[in-house]
């Protein structure tokens, strides 16, 4: 966030607060880094990572299922699809339990 020093208020206290907040925002942005900008900061990081995990697993699962069904003419891979979802489902439900589970706060 860049400050246009020509458009600051005439009141010195207000100008100082604006400059201070801008400096704090720049420092916070530098501290986050690239992953921090992607996942967020504070308490929301855990929820964001769990949500991204669920989204990625669902995309992988649906893609695998569609690809297996389109490539297999005799449906002999249906057992493989069920086994694959048997691996993904516990991870997805674990992440959902983390997101919607009871908070200790």
Image (cartoon, grey):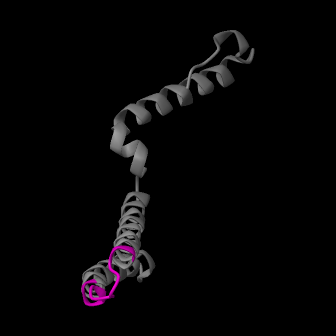
Q: Nearer the viewer, residue 84 or 51?
A: 84
Above or below, 74 relative to 65: below
Left or right: residue 66 compared with residue 15:
left
Q: How far across and how far down the image is residue 87, in percent?
A: 24, 82
Looking at the image, which residue is at 39% across and 57% down? 45
Q: How far across and how far down the image is residue 96, in percent?
A: 40, 78
Q: Which of 93 and 63 is in front in this view?
A: 63
**Which residue is most to the front?**
73
Looking at the image, which residue is at 57% across and 20% down? 2
Looking at the image, which residue is at 38% across and 79% down? 69
Above or below, 32 relative to 19: below
Q: How far across and how far down the image is residue 79, in percent?
A: 26, 90
Q: Residue 76 colored magenta?
A: yes
* Quadrant of the rendering where the N terminus is positioned: top right
Magenta part of the chain: 70-80
**Which residue is most to the top?**
6
């Amino acid at each position: 966030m860049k400050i246009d020093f020509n458009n600051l208020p005439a009141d010195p206290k207000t100008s100082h607060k604006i400059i201070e907040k801008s400096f704090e925002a720049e420092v916070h942005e530098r501290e986050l880094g690239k992953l921090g900008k992607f996942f967020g900061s504070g308490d929301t990081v855990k929820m964001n990572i769990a949500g991204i995990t669920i989204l990625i697993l669902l995309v992988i699962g649906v893609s695998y299922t569609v690809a297996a069904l389109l490539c297999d003419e005799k449906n002999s891979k249906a057992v493989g699809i069920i086994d694959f979802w048997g691996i993904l489902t516990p991870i997805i439900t674990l992440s959902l339990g983390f997101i919607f589970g009871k908070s200790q706060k």
